[in-house]
Amino acid sequence: MLSRTANSIYWMARSLERAENLTRLLDVSHNMSLMPNSKGGQQELLAPLTITGRLDQFRETYPQLNAEALLDFFLFDEANDGSIFSCIRSARDNAHSVRDKLSSEAWESINATWLELRHRRQRGISHEGVKSLIDWIKQRSHEFRGAAYGTMLHNNVFHFMRLGTFIERADNTARILRVKLEVMESQHNSNHAIDFYQWNALLQSLGAYEAYHDKYTGGLTTRNVTELLILSAELPRSLRYCIGALMSQLIAIEGDQGQAAKRLCAELHARLEYGEVDFITRFGLHEYLNDLLRRIHTIGEEIHRSYWEGA
Amino acid sequence: MTAIEKPAPHLYDEMLCNEGVHEHYRAYLQWLENTPDATLEQKRREADTLFRRFGITFNVYGEEEGTERLIPFDLIPRIIPASEWTHLERGLRQRVTALNRFLHDIYHDQEILRAGIIPADQVLTNQQFQVAMLGVDLPGHNYIPITGVDLIRDSDGEYFVLEDNLRTPSGVSYMLENRKMMMRLFPELFLAQGVAPVEHYPNLLLETLQSASDADSPCVVVLTPGRYNSAFFEHAFLAQQMGVPLVEGADLFVRNGCVFMRTTTGPRQVHVIYRRIDDAFLDPLAFNPDSMLGVPGLLSAYRDGNVILANALGTGVADDKSIYPYVPDMIRFYLDEEPILNNVPTWVCRREEDLAYVLEHLEELVVKEVHGAGGYGMLIGPKAGPEELDTFRQLLRDNPANYIAQPTLCLSTCPTMVNEGIAPRHIDLRPFVLSGSEIKLVPGGLTRVALREGSLVVNSSQGGGTKDTWVLEGAPC
């Protein structure tokens, strides 16, 4: 497989996953911002900016932080290369340059999403409302995944696509968790009502609300949420799951390249597979997440080095 | 349905004639007359949506927003009866064979020049003549695996060759997608009529490309300038249909005289490059040093016979306007046959008697610069004022060798869906000829249509559209 093709496929998948994650984040922020300020509404608006590291960029363009400005910045702002609009454009551009490697159904899905998104952008958010826009983006992402799973050969192209998806998703879960933790620590009066809403929102943004209640009885606790989102072998957005999937995709890719990436990934996977929530708590959740993010970043760098710089 | 606007009496129309309708269009016309306007309009919109969703687009240079545009697709097919196609196919095989012989000859013994059939300086000083190709032996002496020949019809319906495209002819993807679209929209038409299939073109193309190499299982790639190129869709489409990698220049490199591509499992040797990049951009070491599209060292690997380029380097000399008038002579010289397909009558102004004729009939003629393209440096006699005519008379006398002249063309028309209903519009035809160990064609080609009333410009960059082209197998039923 051409190195450039692998690179484009990988970034197509990363950008699309990023767009979906961002959508989930906005969904929750939107819900939370509807709550009275005493429950942390303003904090919620800050969260997507902190998670994506775009607070400064936001402040340059928008005088005030309110729900409307935030949505505009993240949904449709062309100047923001981290907006959903920009992510989907980049995913589509990457797909376009390797369209011969996608199944026609997968290509048409992503192309149709892009065309429709431009149309919706012209009509503006108010036309249909935030909620339905957000649902639509999530649905489009599901559709592409379905088309790709169901119609593409599960060969190298597919493996590089999944590689992009899971590394982006792992990164996202770790970041979201870290920021939520910061928000809750900053509120440092251990108010159970606020904690409840915070954890609730976090689970919803990761589509893990039902999963939590399936697995745990009783209320939302930091311990259980941590266990589910970091160590669960079953939740498709948990760190253990994502790194495990990353591992199997790396192994499935033909050839001897990528030894370092495989090694680092296997090490990280072992930490998660045999990890214990008590250890994480003793280590410090915050520090643990920082360490995870560093490791994920290094794996990403190794993937670059092995498959497209070295060739 | 709305009435079909009558064609002009002095032009040949593909569907309608004095007696009513040409026999091969009878069944289609009946169907058309029984189809409500609303249905046609709905199908037209459906086609538009589908083309857009499939991303079957071309890129327009220098446009920021929405740079990917659709080529307008017309629902009314251009139909060719089997007997007509048989004649065309014979003519195309003959013409392409002679052109290929010509290319081999001018890069080797140059017999045609020594025989005085074509003035040597016309060939040797031509910008498209590649000195680097002199004495290079290509496997099977095959220079032009892929050819597109533009055909038009005069007022009597006779076919003429307007132009040979021997460099990187495009449009075949639209031929294939148009057919797919028509079968999707109007399956009943294909059940009722025996339309010869074209869908196997990519298989033929792959066979042709593979047969160009002596390697055991040759690795074939399509080389594209990238996704901003106007024909990128076609490059990606053909690569996908053939199941071969679509590469850009930066994906390839030359080592030890061989060409390799960079893959995730390391370098892999490439044997045949179906290149959709012009000669001048292929190798920055040999040609345009600023080219970011090419592969440094490619020319030397090519000359050593370690890689095949399709089409070969230096084929442009044979489709140049200054050489075009000599193609019938090439057919006579190399094949000892009379041309089956004629050229548009052309006066070569460097010949004294031709010049005299052109000067005398300037008001009726179109005068073209031999190396010009895109309508620059051109005189359209019937539309020119007295001053412009005088200017050209002077130019012709000063430098006659720089010009050729042709009668004002009258392309045939075909009923076409336009805003006002269905009206005749001018069309041409580009069949694609594949030359490997043998010459192969799929029946038909790409029909381009000038959508503006009276316009003769069929180019997609200037508002032209396309039609599906049907070659009927046997008599329509």
Image (tube, coloured by chain):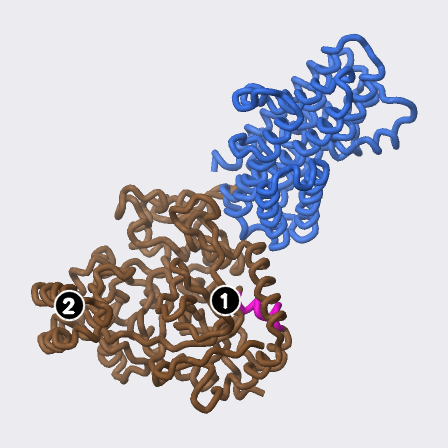
Residue at 40% in and 49% down = B225
Q: Position of residue A278 (x, y in %)?
A: 81, 15
Q: Quadrant of residue A266?
A: top right
The magenta span reads B178-186
> For the residue carrying disc 2, how many other residues have a C-alpha within 10 Å: few (<14), some (14-19), or many (20+)?
few
> For the residue carrying disc 1, how many other residues have a C-alpha within 10 Å: few (<14), some (14-19), or many (20+)?
few
Spot the brown chain and give its letter: B
In the rendered view, tell whether residue A11 sits above or below residue B234.
above
Residue at the spot of label 1: B419
Q: Is residue A72 visible?
A: yes
* Amino acid type at mark 2: Pro
Sequence-wise first label, 2 or 1: 2
For numbered disc 2, what is the local secondary structure? helix
A258 or B315: which is nearer to us?
B315
Are discs 2 and 1 less than 8 Å apart at CB? no
Q: Which labelled disc corresponds to residue B386?
A: 2
